[in-house]
Image: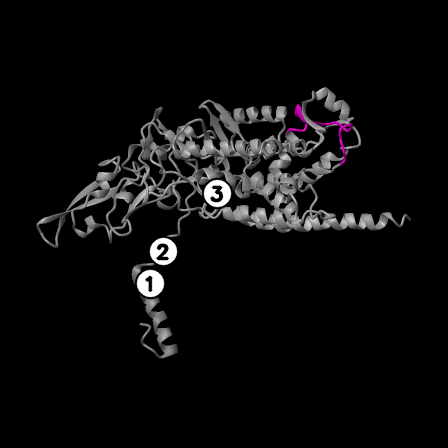
Amino acid sequence: MNKIDTPKRRLFLQKVLYGVGYASIGTIFWSAYLSKSHAKSLLLRPPGALLEKDFITTCIRCGMCVNACPFDVLQLATISKNTPIGTPYFTPRENACRLCPDIPCTTACPTDALDLKLLTKNNLLSINNAKMGLATVNTQSCLAYLGLQCTMCIRACPLADVAIVLKNERNPRTGMHAFLTPVVNPNHCTGCGSCEMACPTNIASIKVFPLFISQSDIGSHYIVGWKKEDEERLKKSSTDITMSRTKRNEKSALDNVTELSHLILIDMLSKTTVSRA
Amino acid sequence: MNNFLFRYRYYLARRMTQIIVLGTYFLANFYGYKIVIGNLSSSVVFGFIPLSDPFATLQMFFAGAVISADILLGVLVVLFFYGIIGGRFFCSWVCPVNIITETAAAIRRKLGLYDKADALFSRNIRYWFIIITLILSSIFSLGAFEMISPIGIAHRGIIFGFGFGWFFLVAIFLFDLFSQKYGWCGHICPLGGFNTLVGKYSLLKVEHDADKCVHSLECFSVCPEVEILEAVGKKSHVITGAACIKCARCIEVCESGAFKVSVVSLAKQLKEGA
């Protein structure tokens, strides 16, 4: 055996093992950080953004949408933000999306992480098809719900009377005034956040949340029978549905009562208490 | 003074390029001059030439993203230039982290922290880093290195604002200063590793003339990838080491002018390599 070679080989092996050790420690921290980045953040994405999961996969973090934004609404996330680093977002309370009709941000995106197709409905491209989030009203602090005439949000709304409508209701407290309360139409709200930016309360009473929080879904098991298209859905559905029903109780109602009183009686006798009855 | 300018001509040119490149991006974002928009991940020059980072795109591909035509075109443009002038040209002429690590290395030389017989890390770590990056990209379905890249943090920070990202850069500076000479750029950075692989047969190379060499070892003290200078002083040859970052420091420091830039055809490179 060559005596000079052996320590060299040992040293080499040692170095390799060191490397494996360092690498695995590094990979653990790295993976932890990466998996944390999948936690959904409350930040809003620019118009036409893919679903959050696909968005962070596809966004190359070039910032061209931020460049293109004429109102400096969009920002790139830094490491301090609770969203994947380098991805674009905006904060509606500070600076809301102005819904530019020429859509400079989505057009600028080279990767289609901001996809013009998502802003196209019936072959018509329009910024009004954007779904960045959904505005929700806190009826406890909204001035209009308290009875004041505010209308700030509807005045700021680029789709006033469509995305936000004012509901006219009698104010029973005074008996002579009306509640003019804002109601958001989820089908038309773009989530631009102009309402949140305009809201005069200390903390905004109308807030835009990402769709994954504020949007709900009726589910396919409900059919709105008085709507024609929903009724159609029922006709198309497969007919071999097996329904399981609980078997109908065939005893008369009186039988049930006597049975129950019998049970109560036993209970009372055993515990000698009336509190249960 | 003239002597200083001459002695540091490439160094100054590189710093100028780095500052001008990032400056143009910054101006595009801040004042809206549309010479170059975007950042080093992906950008558009003069409004029509797309450029995209091939490594970032590769990660996106592994993450399962649909690569758009714009990005693909940008990648091809970049790969074309990398193929001609060398992938690591980016490292020394564009990358902002290079300024940090070269400064750290210079201070290290001044402080005499320079000589350390045994390197802490192998230079091959970067290739392993590439493999781990691609695996993690596909597991977590996002660009894994893009999430932690100090290069991204640096250029996005300069163009769009830092946050606490500067902390990363300070860490790299201290690591390079105290732990390992050119620790980040020369050992760990997977982007550098990727660019090395891409630009292996680039046409632009440094040529060494052993007849002029006076064995001052100056080039060895400045080269960030010393291994590629293996045969310097022994024989006249083209330095074919793919890891060469084209920083031209060797040309500057050589008093006897034993180095020069030259264009070497692929055929010749293959012959010399064999």
Disc 2 marks a residue whose amino acid type is: Asn
Residues under labels 3 and 2: Cα distance? Answer: 62 Å
Residue at x 60% of width, y 45% of height? B104
In the image, the segment drawn in magenta is: B199-215
The answer to whether marks 2 and 1 sit on the same chain is: yes
| Tag 2 and tag 1, C-beta contact below 8 Å | yes
Tell me the element at label 2.
loop
Residue B211 lies in the magenta-colored region: yes
Residue A146 in the image: x percent, y percent?
A: 19, 52
Residue at x 45% of width, y 23% of height? B46
Q: Residues within 10 Å of mark 1 (few under 14, many from 20)?
A: few
Q: Is residue A52 left or right of residue B274?
A: left
Would residue B43 be visible to someone looking at this image?
A: yes
Residue A5 in the image: x percent, y percent?
A: 86, 47
Q: Magenta stretch: dominant SS?
A: loop
Question: Is B203 situated above or below A216?
Answer: above
Residue of label 3: A85
Dot 2: chain letter: A
Dot 1: chain letter: A
Q: Residue furthest left?
A: A176
Residue B12 lies in the magenta-colored region: no
Residues under labels 1 and 3: Cα distance? Answer: 66 Å
| Tag 1 and tag 3, C-beta contact below 8 Å | no
Q: Residue furthest front?
A: B1
Q: Looking at the image, is mark 1 or mark 3 nearer the viewer?
A: 3
Residue of label 1: A256
Q: Earlier in the sequence, mark 1 or mark 3?
A: 3
Q: Is residue A104 left or right of residue B114?
A: left
